[in-house]
């Protein structure tokens, strides 16, 4: 492979950096053993008891200014009080970052035009297991009570856990010994969702949270306990286009051109709950002036229960023209039938129930010791995640066909009508029960880490740090599907309620889904226990094992170059990984049999960060970084499962064909450079302009390629390491607290950022732009703080981007542009008691997916506005 200029720079980085130390080495027979603190030090700075928006902004900028890396920071405004309900919402407002939404909540992070596959996530520096099938972490599982803040690393350090080409996000919990005396905070909110009234469900739900911190035994022992509970309405109004008959359509209007007809549509009215709870426990013991022991445990549970009602119609595909005579009132645009009336079609109604229970746990034991001049740290940790989900569907099809009219013309225009009354149970046949599917994910990640840091006076080197990390991870998935169709099954009309929502068919929704299913289909109808897995179930299951070891060395730098003082770090991390994928294989439809595969690789990841002070006060800084980074393949795509067809004719050499996972996937790699100018022109004030460039190779995407399976040529659809390309961007940041204005305007502040990203990488599916690529995103926050009154208004925007919103890795859609506006107002009634009011999604922004790069194929979801009223009390 031809090396780019950036690649040559990165690969030659480490030996060049140590050259300035050679003269000093020649003069010194041994290290000085200086006990002076390192100029750079660790960037995970714990801020002590900050209060209010202004203090939070100053705290965050202080960490950013003093870090040896290019970082963004979320800092708490007070004990147990981050700016938002969850850390995901706070992260989404940082420069260069945004969030993909799940159920209307900020969830998985997009950074610098790169999606979830490029985001590393750690808790107190430890890698996290995930309840998703890949590696993505759902950041909404971390409520504000449990965290003291977060640091987003945009550049690489040798001592960072590898895995985040775009960024590594380190979530941080409180350190109780950093506080003085006992502190506690409790808060309670009432959440109000107006859209819930549309679907006739409860619109007000509770949210509770609190944190307690104390010290004992002459402040040698510190303890912290935090908890949160939220029962959020999970409601949605949705309409979805299924796509077009691209290959077997006919000329519908006699103009000699083929007109592509739709496969069908679905709508949905969702009326469930999302119940989230978490608890954090942390204990610190200052065993001696030279020893600090910390034990911590975090546990979060997310229980989603979503009854809904859907309508499907799939009788309008007009395969080879068999329905042409039934069509009228055609609206044909660019060769697609986007509106029509069709007679003699059926429709089905689906009273469904989705459950999704997720558990996430992370904990560990950490020790920091002074051993002579060395600072030694040892850490052992474990992280667990699981997900149990089931989609159940009580399905009825219309007894008599009717006439369907629709107009799905894009730009969120979706309207339809059906001649039969879908709110009349008598118009439907007997019910059937479908379970598709009952699925389970389990993820286990254990790690151990040890490091030692020694202050030095060795030319520009002020400290060296060496370390090692070992980790084992195992992730698996299995599922079971079944259906029950009893003869003469009947559900009484009294078991249903009818929902009448403007723009939707009248909908029959079961009042008590589980109770009705139990009485009609049997007491164990929803229980997977003892049920055999189908061949497709077996082929969908998989297990991936990953064993990783890493060694690193890093030097903190402090010197002068070209008349400018500089600081920073340089190092290299060497990572070895052995991976194994297991699954099932079926050849020509035969019974599945076990199969496995794997790979091993070793990667060297050099990195350098330099900060030049352009003035004596260090208010003007020029930052430069070079690094090589990696992001591992999604775990679910590393499965060995495959379905193969082969020509059984004697003597045939025809290649195998089929679909498969790929346990031999290697990580995506990137050579990257960053350059930033930062001006800290006042307390809590910053102007910053940054450029970044990443040259990514071994990019992972799904395509049909020619490979070898069991010694035979095969043409298989699967994920592969293919060609990559560049990702580059510009980031601008302006923050200012107007403290010099006359009262009362001295309480004003503003934070604004804008990012532009571009890439020549395209997905192998539909030639989409790279997943996660937002060309533009940014936001503005105006805030005011004075005499116990606080107010914040934020507007965040992103341009369209491609995402993978489903478990199926090959399914991609373009998430349309979005602007989210939120506002929060609070007032301290007493020094301890605060009243709070919040408004979220003020403009009622919808989420719109456009599929197959076709403007007429849209999935439009509305979650509605959300409000909260609450109180907080500090002890």
Image (cartoon, rainbow, N blue to C red):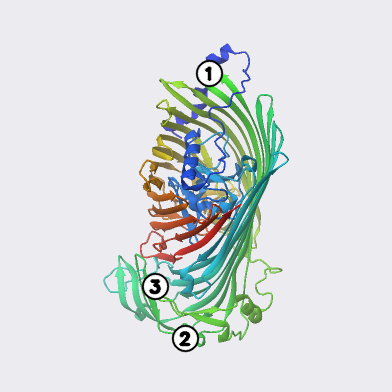
Give the total of numbered labels. 3
Give residue 125's quadrant in the image: top right
Residue at (52% x, 64% y) in the render: 191
* Mark 2, secondary structure of its residue: loop
813 left or right of 278 in image = left
Q: Could you tell me residue 650's position as x and y percent? A: 58, 57
Q: Is residue 670 above or below residue 204?
A: above
Q: Secondary structure at mark 3?
A: helix
Residue farthest toward the left in the current orientation of the protein = 255
| Residue 637 vertical placement versus 314 (above, below) | above
Give the CA separation, mark 1 to mark 2.
87 Å
Q: Position of residue 24 (x, y in %)?
A: 55, 15
Q: Are marks 3 and 2 in contact (CB under 8 Å)?
A: no
Q: Residues within 10 Å of mark 1 (few under 14, many from 20)?
A: some
Asked whether 704 or 448 is in front, the reply is 448
Q: Quadrant of residue 6?
A: top left
Residue 230 screen position, x and y as percent = 58, 61
Q: Earlier in the sequence, mark 1 or mark 3?
A: 3
Residue hosting label 3: 320
Asked which secondary structure carries label 1, the reply is loop
Residue beneath disc 1: 459
Q: Quadrant of residue 290?
A: top right
Q: Nearer the viewer, mark 1 or mark 2?
A: 1
> Vertically, is 413 above or below 500?
above
The x, y position of residue 820, in whole percent, is 41, 57
Query: Between tags 1 and 3, which lies in front?
Result: 1
The residue to which callout 2 is attached is: 400
Badge 2 density bin: few <14, some 14–19, many ≥20, Cα 10 Å: few
The residue under the point 61% across, 84% down is 489
């Amino acid at each position: 492979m031809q090396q780019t200029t950036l690649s040559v720079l990165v690969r030659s980085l480490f030996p060049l950096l140590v050259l300035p130390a050679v003269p000093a080495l020649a003069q010194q027979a041994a290290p000085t053993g200086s006990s002076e603190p390192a100029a750079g030090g660790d960037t995970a700075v714990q801020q002590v008891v900050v209060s209010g928006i202004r203090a939070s902004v100053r705290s965050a900028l202080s960490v950013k200014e003093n870090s040896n890396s290019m970082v963004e920071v979320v800092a708490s405004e007070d004990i147990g009080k981050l700016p938002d309900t969850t850390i995901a919402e706070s992260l989404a407002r940082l420069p260069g970052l945004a969030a993909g939404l799940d159920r209307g909540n900020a969830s998985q992070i997009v950074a610098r035009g790169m999606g979830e596959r490029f985001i590393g996530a750690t808790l107190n520096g430890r890698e996290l297991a995930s309840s998703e099938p890949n590696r993505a972490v759902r950041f909404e599982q971390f409520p504000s009570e449990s965290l003291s803040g977060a640091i987003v690393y945009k550049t690489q350090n040798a001592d960072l856990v590898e895995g985040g080409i775009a960024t590594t996000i380190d979530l941080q919990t409180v350190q109780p010994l950093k506080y003085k005396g006992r502190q506690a905070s409790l808060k309670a909110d009432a959440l109000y969702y107006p859209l819930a009234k549309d679907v006739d469900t409860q619109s007000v739900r509770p949210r509770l949270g609190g944190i307690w911190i104390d010290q004992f035994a002459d402040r040698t022992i510190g303890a912290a306990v935090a908890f949160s509970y939220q029962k959020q309405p999970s409601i949605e109004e949705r309409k979805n286009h299924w796509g077009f008959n691209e290959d077997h359509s006919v000329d519908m209007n006699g103009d000699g051109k083929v007109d592509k007809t739709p496969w069908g549509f679905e709508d949905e009215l969702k009326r469930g709950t999302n119940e989230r709870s978490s608890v954090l426990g942390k204990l610190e013991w200052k065993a001696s002036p030279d020893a600090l022991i910390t034990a911590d445990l975090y546990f979060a549970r997310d229980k989603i229960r979503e009854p809904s009602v859907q309508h499907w119609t799939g009788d309008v595909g007009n395969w080879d023209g068999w329905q042409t005579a039934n069509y009228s009132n055609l609206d044909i645009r660019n060769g697609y039938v986007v509106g029509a009336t069709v007679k003699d079609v059926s429709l089905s109604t689906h009273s469904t129930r989705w459950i999704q229970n997720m558990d996430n746990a992370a904990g560990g034991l950490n020790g920091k010791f002074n051993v002579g001049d060395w600072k030694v740290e040892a850490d052992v940790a474990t992280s667990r995640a699981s997900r149990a989900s089931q989609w159940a569907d009580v399905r009825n099809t219309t007894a008599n066909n009717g006439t369907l009219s629709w107009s799905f013309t894009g730009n969120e225009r979706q309207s339809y009508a059906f001649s039969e009354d879908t709110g009349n149970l008598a118009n439907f046949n007997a019910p059937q029960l479908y379970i598709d599917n009952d699925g389970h994910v389990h993820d286990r990640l254990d790690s151990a880490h040890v490091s030692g840091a020694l202050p030095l006076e060795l030319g520009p080197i002020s400290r060296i740090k060496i370390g090692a990390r070992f980790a084992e991870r195992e992730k698996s998935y299995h599922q079971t599907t079944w259906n029950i169709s009893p003869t003469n099954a009947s559900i009484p009309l009294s078991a249903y309620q009818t929902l009448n929502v403007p723009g939707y068919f009248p909908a029959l929704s079961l009042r008590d889904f589980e109770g009705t299913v139990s009485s009609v289909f049997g007491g164990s109808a929803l229980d997977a226990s003892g049920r055999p897995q189908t061949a497709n179930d077996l082929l969908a299951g998989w297990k991936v094992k990953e064993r990783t070891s890493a060694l690193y060395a890093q030097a903190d730098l402090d010197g002068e170059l070209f008349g400018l003082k500089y600081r920073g770090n340089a190092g290299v991390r060497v990572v070895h990984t052995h991976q194994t994928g297991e699954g099932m294989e079926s050849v020509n439809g035969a019974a599945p049999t076990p199969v496995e595969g794997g790979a091993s690789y070793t990667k060297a990841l050099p990195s350098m960060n330099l900060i030049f002070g352009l003035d004596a006060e260090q208010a003007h800084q020029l930052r430069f970084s070079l690094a090589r980074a990696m992001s591992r393949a999604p775990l679910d795509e590393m499965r060995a499962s495959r379905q193969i067809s082969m020509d059984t004719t004697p003597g045939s050499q025809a290649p195998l064909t089929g679909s498969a996972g790929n346990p031999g996937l290697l990580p995506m790699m990137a050579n990257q450079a960053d350059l930033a100018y930062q001006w800290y022109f006042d307390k809590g004030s910053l102007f910053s302009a940054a450029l970044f460039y990443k040259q990514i190779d071994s990019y992972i995407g799904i395509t049909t390629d020619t490979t070898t399976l069991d010694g035979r040529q095969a043409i298989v659809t699967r994920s592969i390491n293919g060609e990559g390309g560049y990702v580059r961007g510009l980031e601008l940041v302006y923050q200012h607290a107007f403290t010099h204005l006359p009262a009362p305007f001295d309480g004003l502040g503003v934070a604004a950022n804008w990012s532009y990203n571009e890439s020549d990488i395209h997905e192998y599916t539909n030639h989409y732009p790279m997943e996660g690529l937002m060309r533009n995103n940014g936001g503005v926050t105006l805030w005011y703080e004075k005499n116990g009154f606080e107010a914040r208004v934020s507007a965040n925007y992103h341009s369209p981007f491609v995402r993978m919103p489903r478990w199926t890795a090959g399914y991609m859609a373009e998430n349309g542009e979005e602007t989210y506006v939120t506002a929060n107002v609070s007032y301290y009634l007493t020094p301890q008691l605060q009243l709070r009011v919040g408004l979220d999604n003020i403009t009622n922004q919808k989420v719109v997916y456009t599929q197959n790069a076709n403007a007429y194929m849209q999935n439009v979801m509305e979650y509605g506005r959300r409000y909260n009223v609450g109180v907080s009390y500090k002890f």
